[in-house]
Each structure stands twice: as structure tokens, then as C-alpha cells.
Amino acid sequence: MDRPLRLITTSPVDRLARTVEALLVVASQPLSVDELAEAANDDSERIETALGLLGERYTEGRSGIVLEHVAGGWAFRASREAADACGRLFERPVERGLSAAALETLAIVAYLGPVSRPEIARIRGVAADSVVAGLVERGLIAESGREEGVGGAVRYRATPLFERVFGLDSLSALPRLDDLGDSTEEIRERLESVAERRGA
Amino acid sequence: MVVRELELDLDAFEGPFDLLLTLVLKEELDLAEVDVAGIVLAFIERLAERDELDLEACGEFLVLVAALLELKARGLFPDEEAELSELEPEEAAEELARRLAEYRRAKEAAAWLAERLEAESDRFFRLGPAPLAPRVERRLAPQQPEALAGALRVLAQEPPAVSLAHLELRFPPVAQFLDRFRAVLRRRRVFDLDAEVEGMSRIEQAVAFLALLELRRGGEVALEQAAPFAPIRVKRAAEERREEWTARSA
């Protein structure tokens, strides 16, 4: 062993954690482990270890900055307890004043995307042009190729920003549509309560 | 105003609108017995209670009621369906039910998103365009000054003169043909140009023609051509005048 003894207490993983921390502070969008590894010039496994160290430090209740896995990458956000203060200084413009029609269209794109405007219009029963344009402008959906065939309609998909605003790890974190809404039991319960009211 | 929460009090059904839809889609309630006009009335009454027109709710209601009505119509008149659509009545009803269910699922998903948005409204994070990636530096291979000097030397050399030989045209002097034609005309009164220039190059023929025009301008010859591209006949000018005179005296 010709390697000299380390007298400094910081281990290389600590230093790597500081590098990762710095990268996340500079980044304006979530960074994947691969991106972090490339920028830090280190291997993915050690990056994961460094992220583990940071995750312990940057948690709710312990820090005003919270490390989270969102939109397929790692990012810092403000802690929830600081939300009121943040709200006095900043607003969340992406989701401000999203209409019911916009949410519906967003849901269709998030679940069925890539999906074209004609398809959205078919499901919703009304034209989707202006709603789609509004969502694109907010950055919640983006163009994603065209339908097959000559002159195919532009298709749209949900963006990483959508995942981030809704706090989703990825689109697969959306609940299954079957899990939504009324279960058969619930319908029966409601029927019974209606019957009770009628009888009363 | 939320359309799905519209309270209905019909003969066949009492409860919120979306429960009615669910029961119809699950075929637990026969649509034929549902008074759709009653639903419309209930909606209009609810709408009238409010001061402003809720376009969002109206749109949603129209979509749902239109689908319901079509579904009901197809259920009531199964036989006439064949003329109205290429789909079989059952297929058409199924398609409608499927569409209605699809729309309902989209509504539910939207409701989930709205709830999620509310729950996540305390999420604040930095938002902005990504910083630019650093420009990739293109490294050059190690360079040798001699190679550069060599390259410059090649560039500094005077380029060889470009040959224009292929562009050059040699025109024989017009005078040469003037003399030649005058000599011919001294021997003969009339000759054909074509015969005289036969075997000459294209350029020589052109110059010969120019010489001919020159002679004509000077009044030394008269020219005749029976038709376009026909042989050009050249006559001594004096001969021509004599013929004219002969013709007039005859």
C-alpha cells in the first residue's frame, strides 16, 4: 500500500455530495443520476450514495430546502412549511387560473398522450384548439410528433414541467383510471342514501 | 356550478346527475324510462338561479345530454337505425356508451388533477430556462510550422493562365468575299449563293452572307428567294433593271 494515510476527516463521498448539491442548486430542472454522474465526472453508484446523504439532510422539518425525486430526476424545492412565505413573494404562474376545460384536456393528454387535437375534441365533444394552445404556452404539454400518414395531425404529450407541478415522479405515477370515481359499492351506498331521503 | 352534481327529481330516478350517468352506463337503469326533458328542465332551473351564465357548465351539459339523447333514441328505435348509420344499432349504442364512458373518465381524471393541484399548491421550486451547456471545444491536432509554410507556398504561386482557345472565333474579312462575288458576277449574270459557299465553315458562310448584304446595300446586286430556306439567287443589278424594263415594254 503506497497510498498515504488520509488525515482529513472528509471522505470522497462527502466531497461528491457537495458537488451534487452544487449542481442541483444551479439546475433549473430535475437532473437524472446519469446527468449528475456525467457533470460530476463520477460513476452512477457513488452519485446515488451521495444523493442518499443529501436526502437525509434536505428533508421536511430539518431544512428549508427539500431534496425530492420528481419528473424522472432529482431537484431541490422549498419546504412546505415555508410555502406561505414563498407565496407572498412568488406565485405559481404555470397553474394559475387553469379552467376546468384546461384540466380536462390536460388529463386526456397526460393519460392518453401522445394524442392529437382531433382526438381530444372527439373525447371532450368540443373543439380543443385554444385550450391546447394555452397549455402549450404554460409549458404543461408539448408537441410530440405527428399522426401517421401524410399531413397527420400534431400530437401532444405532457411535459416534465407537468410532472413537477403536480409532484409526480413520472406519468406512470398517475392513478389508474379504473381506480378513479365511484366503485360499485359506493354507488349502492349512494342509492341507499337517496332511497332513505325519499322515504323520509 | 358542477353539472355532475345537478340534483334530479325524475319519475325513474332521483339523485345527482353523475349517478344517473353511472347507472345508465352500468345498464342498471333503463334509459328508455328516463325523462331527458326533465333533466334539461332541472338544469335550466339551476342555471336561472344564478345571475351569470356559466358557459363551462352549459358546454359540459350539452355534451352529456346530447350523448344521452342519442343513446336513448337508438334504444327506442332500433329498426330505423340501419338507415341512419352504417353501424348496427347495438354497435352504435355501444360506441356511444363507450364515448360517454371515455368522457366521464376524462372528467374524473381532471377532477383528480384538480385535487392534486390543490394538495400540491405549497410546492415552490425554481423555474426557468435551463442554462446553456458549455460550448464543446474542438481541439486541433499538434501543428507544424513547416506544413503551414508549405501550404502557403502552394497558395502563393501564380496560377497557370487559363486557355481561352475554345472560345476563339476566327472571322475571315468581309472584303475577301466582296471581291470574290464581284469576280463571279463579272463572269456570270446570275449565281446561287448556296452553290458558291458550299463546303465552307459555318463562320465563313455567315461572313459570305454579310458580304452579300453589303453588295445589295451598295446596289451592285439584286437578291431573290422563292420561299424561306429556298436557295438565294444573286443577280447583277444592271441585269435586273434591264429585265424590269423588258417586262414593262412588253
Image (tube, rainbow, N blue to C red):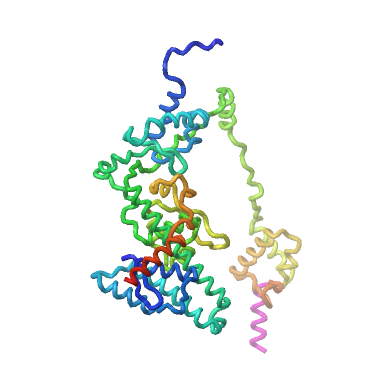
Furthest residue in direction bottom, as rendered: B250
Locate the C terminus of chain B and report the quarter of the image it occupies.
bottom right
Residue B132 located within the stretch drawn in magenta: no
Q: From what the image shows, is residue B117 above or below residue B47?
A: above
At a point 66% along the width and 62% down the height, the residue shown is: B206
Which of the pair B100/A47 is nearer the observer? B100
Q: Quadrant of residue B104?
A: bottom left
Locate the N terminus of chain B and report the quarter of the image it occupies.
bottom left
At a point 65% along the width and 65% down the height, the residue shown is: B209
Q: Position of residue B133 (x, y in %)?
A: 44, 37
At a point 47% along the width and 46% down the height, the residue shown is: A170
Which of the pair B126/A1 is nearer the observer? A1
Span colored in magenta: B236-250
Residue B247 located within the stretch drawn in magenta: yes
Q: From what the image shows, is residue A92 above or below residue B90?
A: above
Q: Position of residue B184 (x, y in %)?
A: 72, 66
* A37 left or right of A134 in image: right
Q: Position of residue A194 (x, y in %)?
A: 36, 68
